[in-house]
Image (tube, helix red, strand yellow):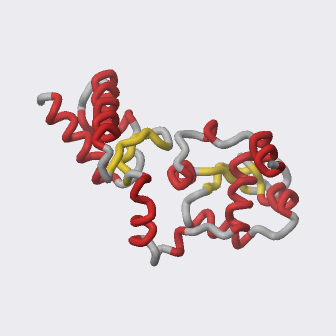
Amino acid sequence: MEAKEKKSLIEALLFVSGEPVTLAALKEIAELPETELRELLEELMREYREKNGGMLIIEIANGFQMVTNAYYAQWMKKLRSAGASNKLSLPALETLAIIAYNQPIIKAELEHIRGVNSDGVIKSLLDKRLIKIMGKKEVPGKPLLYGTTREFLQYFGLKDLTELPSIKELTREEAA
């Protein structure tokens, strides 16, 4: 298979997936060496950036994904105007932030920080697959431990959790 065909294959896989595809998955499916695959991905990402069209290929959530160009966001918002269910409430954002910065965390610790019952918000975040049950804490009652998911990274456009702003950065921005 020629380089052009290999890039077309990768492009098709990313397009059809609709979510980040790991390098390992691409390697297995395309049956290409990892170094060659990485080079082809870098070329594709560069080509899409230079073209500055409606689509881009980016590295996100420990994988690669085909996404719309942010320049067209206002039109994408119009298209998705009926998609209010994708929006997160302030309590959901607050709960998600606490989980992201303190994971793994149990519900009692989360509620202690928030100061309110979080049953409904936790259920909503689980339903949206932004958080997951990571196990049980080894204490009496064995409460569930919660943490964020790949979908969380994807939703917020993060490559991994290290891209979250630090607490210092957040408090500095609040003070400004």
Q: Is residue 65 left or right of residue 87?
A: left
Q: Residue furthest front?
A: 176
112, above or below 149, in the image: below
Q: Residue at x 32, y 50 (%)?
A: 55
State the quadrant of the N terminus. Answer: top left
Instruction: Locate residue 19, reporting x and y percent.
Output: 40, 51
26, above or below 134, in the image: above
Instruction: Locate residue 97, reporting x and y percent.
Output: 71, 54
Q: Residue furthest left?
A: 1
Q: Which is nearer the eye, 53 or 128?
A: 53
The image quarter in which residue 162 lies = top right
Q: Residue furthest top?
A: 35
Q: Is residue 127 left or right of residue 142?
A: left
Q: Which is nearer the eye, 155 or 126?
A: 155
Q: Is residue 151 left or right of residue 169?
A: left
Would residue 28 be seen by someone viewing this image from the given angle? Answer: no
Q: Residue at x 30, y 41 (%)?
A: 48
Would residue 47 be seen by someone viewing this image from the given angle? Answer: yes
